[in-house]
Amino acid sequence: MSARWRLCLTLGALAAVATMTMAAIAYATTRHRLQAEVDRSVAVRLERPLGGLRAAGRRIPNGILEELIASDTRLQIIGVSGDVQAWTGPVPLPVDATDRLLAGGGSAAGVRLRTVDVEGEPFRIGTRAVPGIGAVQVARSLDETDRVLASLRRQFGLVVGAVVVGAAALGYLIARRSARSLERLTAAAEEVAMRGSPAVPIDPSAYGRDETGRLAGAMATMLDALAQSQRQQRDLVQDAGHELRTPITSLRTNLDVLARHPDLDPARRDTVVAELRGELIELGTLVDELVAAATDPSEAGAEQPRVVSLDAVVRQVAGRVGRRHGRLVTVDGTGAAVLAPPVGLARAVGNLLENAVKFSPDGSAVSVRLDGGRVAVSDAGGGIDPADADRVWDRFYRSAGSRTLPGSGLGLAIVRQVVTGAGGEVFVVPRRADGVNGPPPAVGFVLPTVP
């Protein structure tokens, strides 16, 4: 069964239960009030003539019948012996043992009320003992009350039926409207699956502000993220292909030189071999960086973050980079404990230091400033141009001044990936374009500290 019909039947059933419950309560209340009114009328008519009956003894004075009997009531007198002495109407009213007990004076005074059937017609009978006479009974027909209740039942039935039909129709309209939005979203999802492309426009404002609108907004956001991911994948493949062409071309050229000149002098051969080794090292570094840039930190098997000492990691990496390049790498300040993947954090710090070494004069020092979860790397180079400050973290981006230097353009992108994955932020302090003194140029990141 479709959701549309389920909602329709559910609303109809709820409306039926609610209206039937209210109708039953109203019917029971009305029936009780009508019967109470009949009982009050019978009791009042029995109360009014008692004084006259006592004074008259066995004889009922003139006028008593007029006070007792109305057009819708009957009168009956039961003697002390329990026999019916007089009655009005075509037949006597039924008398039971309790009525005879009242007439004989064997029960407490009061009005006894009960419902009986006389020749197929319902009556409400009130019986009251009268000393010296026996008992007096007044009966009032319930036929009019039953007709009112029967009419009320018919009206309640019509109301219940109308409410159920109306609720079912309203439920169908609501379900149809809701299902129409869901059908549009379903069609969009099926189109994405069929085309294999997230380029399916979804306007969340066209679906309202209810749950369907929220679902449309979530789908639109998801498709945008998927489209962006596909664009990034295409860009990564294209940029990787572009970056791989240079070392591969250089390798092919040097190999052709060795193949065409087998008698190449040793000095020239050593130079070509050194270039080959350098290109292979550069190619291996590029492949490692491509793998690191393309790896989703949330994937199964990825390195899990844990609490590490930022101070210890920075000092260890600084010592390794300094020994590798024969540079002085100073570390000032104190780092705090952070929650991050240890290997990824060391790679991020290493990439910052390698960049500083690459873009600073030979023999100059590189400095690292630690302050809790903040790491700032400075060097003696010219600093980052303000125009490049927002793009240096992009994959494969290389400024105009760095395109002649070795590198893939992935180092800082990997830094941002590691830092943002650990809940931190990267920053750049560019050089002042106007030449005014200010904070020293620096590149770094800030990670949340662990208490």
Image: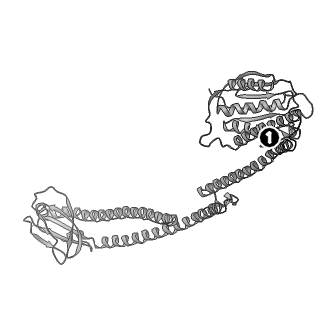
Which amino acid type is shown beneath numbered disc 1? Gly
In the displayed image of the protein, which residue is found farthest to the bottom?
90
Task: Please state which of residues 242 and 409 is positioned toward the viewer in this rendering.
Answer: 242
The residue nearer to you, when weighing 238 against 272, is 272
Q: Position of residue 254 (x, y in %)?
A: 84, 42
What percent of the width, then of the height, locates residue 34? 32, 65
Residue 209 spot, x, y in % from top left: 63, 56
Left or right: where 185 falls relative to 367: left
Relative depth, front residue between 179 and 270:
270
Question: Can the viewer see residue 66?
Answer: no
**How many C-alpha atoms fall within 10 Å of the one at disc 1: few (<14), some, or many (≥20)?**
many
Q: Is residue 129 left or right of residue 327?
A: left
Q: Secondary structure at mark 1?
A: loop
Instruction: Give above or below for 36 relative to 227.
Output: below
Q: Is residue 236 above or below residue 35?
A: above
Seen from the viewer's position, the closer of residues 90 and 175 is: 175
- Which residue is at a point 81% across and 30% down the rendered structure image? 356
Return the x and y of residue 304 as percentages of the image width and height. 61, 36
Residue that badge 1 annotates: 409
- Establish if 169 lies above or below 428: below
Colour mapping used in the image:
one colour
Quadrant in the picture for residue 381: top right
Residue depicted at x 49% and y 68%: 168
Q: Residue furthest front?
A: 263
Which picture quadrant has residue 424?
Answer: top right
Residue at the outermost left position = 81
